[in-house]
Image (spheres, coloured by chain):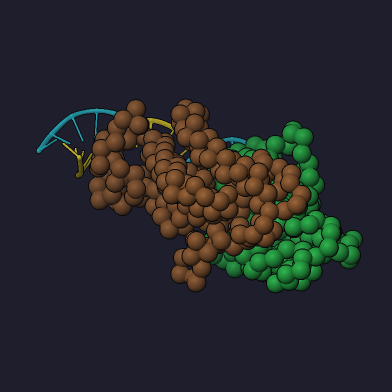
Chain colours: A brown, B green, C yellow, D cyan
Amino acid sequence: MNVVNESPRRKELTRLAAQLFVQEGFDRTTVRMLAQEMGIKSGSLFHHFRDKQEILAAVIEEGTQNALSIARQALEGCEDSAEARLHAMARAHLETLLTDRNAHVVALYEWRRLDAEARDHLSHLRDAYEALWERVIDEALEAGLIRGDRFLVSRFVMGALNWTVRWYDPEGPRKPEDLAHELIAMIAPASSDAPLSTKV
Amino acid sequence: MNVVNESPRRKELTRLAAQLFVQEGFDRTTVRMLAQEMGIKSGSLFHHFRDKQEILAAVIEEGTQNALSIARQALEGCEDSAEARLHAMARAHLETLLTDRNAHVVALYEWRRLDAEARDHLSHLRDAYEALWERVIDEALEAGLIRGDRFLVSRFVMGALNWTVRWYDPEGPRKPEDLAHELIAMIAPASSDAPLSTKV
DNA sequence: GTCTATAGCGGGATAGAC
DNA sequence: GTCTATCCCGCTATAGAC
């Protein structure tokens, strides 16, 4: 139902909702606030969405879908070294989180607010995105760029990236790309250099 | 006011509140739910706390204070290598997050829900805890155990640790200590070995 | 597709008896 | 320190006119 109903109007409303959800959190965002931001009255909102839950689901679907396609695009553009691919992935992730500052953040931080039905419907999307991450991590492990457990490394790296939302200052000197670079420098022993002797 | 008013009763109520805040989130936890968990009626709750905000502040103060003293304790017990200290710090952090599963999680995940006054009152506590982290990171940098920017490394490491709350399974095979070990193995090139030739 | 008006509910918090 | 009773408010969602 959501996947099909993609009128430009609805997409625009979804974009505005994402902004508010990031600023205030889903629970504290009222339908009145949403309506005002959209330039309509609260009653009119329910012509576009069945209920508040459906707005959240739309935002999260949009956010994950977007992150997924941007990440895929970034990876297509670099088939070279494992390090370049890891960097591209981290950079794409951070840009959807910190530059966009919208739907992807909601997807990560308000996932638990989805009802069972929506979680069920959207989990395959999230899984696809995480699978992309695990593949890139795998390549980096095989290349000897990093070391450790595949699962744990993925979680730690994504955690480090996801948490940037809490402290990153867009007005500051560092760009998302810089963060991506620094993170990889932190976990890859000899960045852009010979692999380790001890392969895992 | 909060600092002084530390009756055992209030402490117990704070502990119960922390549990609910973790499970449901602050916004979705009603005073009626809190009261029921405490075995009293909702009206009685306001004999112990002025309002719902004050409960949150009490939980976060407790959680941060506790994390701080446990971390200090852990560091006192190991004055040896920078790696041992880093490990002790990560382990202490994870245990207050994942074993306790209580106030420290609330302190991290519901900080934004504090009103301006409470944030002002509690920020020095949070700063003290983060300063502890930065000191340990500094030592590790100076020892050549890890490399990178002091500020960014701190944020990345804390982010990786804080995000574990989202995926860690207490029933699974891995203990918090294992996670601490794996994280350090990921960022320290030659764990428990000679330092790098390239000091930062 | 948007409006006004409002139903219906559940939230935080208070008052005063015990 | 806890109870009952209740106020008042703001929230989500609906109904029907335009």
Report the front residue among C7 and B169.
Answer: B169
Quadrant of the snapshot with the N terminus of chain B: bottom right
Report the front residue among A89 and A170.
Answer: A89
Q: Position of residue D14 (x, y in %)?
A: 30, 29
Q: Quadrant of residue A58?
A: top left
Q: Is residue B19 above or below residue A86?
A: above
Quadrant of the snapshot with the C terminus of chain B: bottom right
Q: How many marks?
A: 0
Specify whether residue B82 is in view: yes
Q: Residue at x 67, y 38 (%)?
A: B37
Q: Residue at x 24, y 47 (%)?
A: A40
Q: Is residue A62 left or right of residue B190?
A: left
Q: Residue at x 90, y 61 (%)?
A: B77
Q: Position of residue A151 (x, y in %)?
A: 66, 40
Q: Quadrant of residue A48?
A: top left
Q: Is residue D1 left or right of residue A11?
A: right
Q: Is residue B141 above or below residue B8?
A: below
Q: Is residue A176 above or below residue A72?
A: below
Specify whether residue B17 is in view: no
Q: Position of residue A69 (x, y in %)?
A: 41, 43
Q: Position of residue B121 (x, y in %)?
A: 63, 67
Q: Is residue B81 left or right of residue C16?
A: right
Report the front residue among A164 and D8.
Answer: A164
Report the front residue among B111 and A167.
Answer: A167
Q: Residue at x 65, y 37 (%)?
A: B36
